[in-house]
Amino acid sequence: MTKQFAVIGNPIEQSRSPELHHAFAAKTGVDLNYKKILAPLDGFETTTKTFFSQGGIGMNVTVPFKEQAFTLCDQLTERAKIAKAVNTLWMQDGTLYGDNTDGQGLVAAIQALGWNLENSRILILGAGGATRGVIYPLVQAGAKKIVIANRTLARAEQLVNDLKDAVVQAELSAIGLEQLSGEFDLAINATSASLTGDALQLPENLIFHHAYEMAYGKPSSFLDQAQARQVPSTDGFGMLVGQAIEAFYIWNAVKPELKDFL
Ligand code: ATR
């Protein structure tokens, strides 16, 4: 029987998840149908419950419902608890499970590029939900020092406070964007600046050897500056594919190879 999946969000038209999951299915021989669901802003819970009551197997969750999905679940993975956001749902024996595969998607994308994370020093720009979701997987992958730089310093400090007990293997710290300096193996742009078209100004005395922009398909001043410095850099398409692969693996117990879909 064809297994039913969906991605839920508002807006949802832009989502590339259906094409990715259908491509994974074609490659691995899984029989599935994966559709987009536009939920009303006040209708996430009802829409989700209807999907699962009609036999849906799994659902991805995107903006703006990841925090609501987190509160709706009966059971959460460790990384979803730390992220306080859920992008992958599934129902088993009447229990709604939630995971967050965004961070592992980023880690897999970075590793597929051959960039080393073991003992790495990482700078993350931004302190919103996107940053929260990736810190624990980055530390699990070997990051030793993570500096979170945010326009609003207090928000970065709050994030460090919230996460420091969960990632004791790494040194976490918070700075304001105007304090940017030092040397990092990797800089990650997790701000929404590229989505809104705003420029981020990186100072000359900030040194980084690789640059990862989480957004994709948008002009990015962060990537422009990385390219001007001739630093290896990429947009976030690999992370998108990576998080989809992790969700596919949870639901179907077979893992497509990231490099086949980049
Ligand atoms: P997300 O869930 O995508 O992380 P978010 O929670 O709204 O979205 O967070 C957006 C992040 O981008 C924040 O860190 C925000 O900085 P503030 O906390 O100071 O608001 C950052 N951001 C957005 N626009 C920015 C800009 N033009 N310059 C610098 N940082 C920006």
Image (cartoon, rainbow, N blue to C red):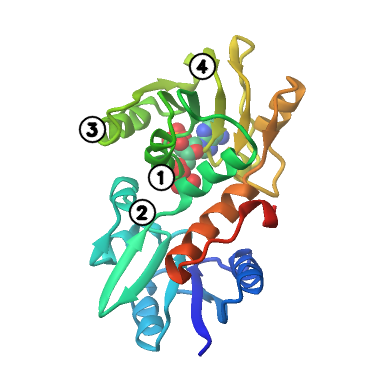
- The mark that comes first in sequence, 2 or 3, is 2
Residue found 63% across the figure and 64% down from its top = 16
Some atom of ligand 1 lies within 8 Å of the CB belonging to the residue at label 2: no
- The mark that comes first in sequence, 3 or 1, is 1
Residue annotated with mark 4:
180
Give the label on residue 85, or none: 2
- The mark that comes first in sequence, 2 or 4, is 2
Judge left or right: residue 93 versus residue 109: left
Residue annotated with mark 1:
133
Q: Secondary structure at mark 2?
A: loop
Residue found 25% across the figure and 80% down from its top = 94
Q: CA distance from mark 2 to mark 3?
A: 18 Å
Residue annotated with mark 3:
165
Q: CA distance from mark 3 to mark 1?
A: 15 Å
- Residue 75 lies, in percent from the top left, at 24, 63
- Residue 48 lies, in percent from the top left, at 38, 76
Q: CA distance from mark 2 to mark 4?
A: 28 Å
Asked if marks 2 and 3 touch (Cβ < 8 Å), the reply is no
Instruction: Give the answer, above or below, for where 196 lies relative to 34.
Output: above
Q: CA distance from mark 2 to mark 1?
A: 7 Å
Q: Nearer the viewer, mark 1 or mark 4?
A: 1
Q: Secondary structure at mark 3?
A: loop
